Image (spheres, rainbow, N blue to C red):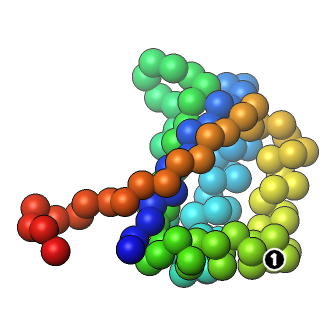
Amino acid sequence: MIVTCFLRYVVDPYKLDDFETYGRMWIRLVKKFGGDHHGYFMPSEGTNNVALAMFTFPSFAEYERYREASMHDAECQEAWALAERTRCIVSWERSFFRPVFSANRA
């Protein structure tokens, strides 16, 4: 079963450039590990400190493999280090969903 990870970030509104750099890194990294990234959604109008991201893996098992592999990947560690160094992320929440991509029931 396909699984989509939904991330809601509380970000420092004065460090949006740092957070966007972080997000651009992860778009490529999720793809590197077999996921399909649906993008980062930066604050625009309204709330200035909430950003969102979504990405999909073919199964929860594939997601778990990505999580394990990312712990040992130098590029992933670089992305985490950027967020930690800049403190652009205040907090985050992660939820998982089963997407419906078609009007027809499979």
For the residue pair 5 and 28, the one nearer the viewer reads as 5
Q: In the rendered image, which residue does mark 1 sit on?
A: 73
Q: Work out which quarter of the rendered image holds the N terminus and state it.
A: bottom left
Image check: 73 left or right of 44?
A: right
Q: Position of residue 88 (x, y in %)?
A: 76, 37
Q: Residue at x 84, y 65 (%)?
A: 77
**Quick one: quadrant of the C terminus?**
bottom left
Residue 16, x across and y down, in percent: 66, 35
Q: Position of residue 21 (x, y in %)?
A: 68, 52
User: For the residue marked with disc 1, what is the amino acid?
Assistant: Asp
Given residues 81 and 7, the one toward you in this image is 7
Residue at x-position 69% and y-position 43%: 19
Looking at this rendering, what residue extends furthest in the top direction? 46
Q: Is 91 positioned to the left or the right of 106 in the image?
A: right
Residue 16 seen in the current view: no
Q: Where is residue 53? Give x, y as percent.
A: 52, 49
Q: Residue at x 65, y 31 (%)?
A: 10
Instruction: Count how many numbered circles sit on residues in the image.
Output: 1
54 w.r.t. 1: above or below: above
**Identity of the residue drawn at 32% across and 60% down:** 99
Q: How would you rate the neighbour count of disc 1 (Cα within 10 Å): few for under 14, some for 14-19, many for 20 or more?
A: few
Q: Is residue 23 visible?
A: yes
Q: Is residue 84 above or below residue 50?
A: below
Tag 1's secondary structure? loop
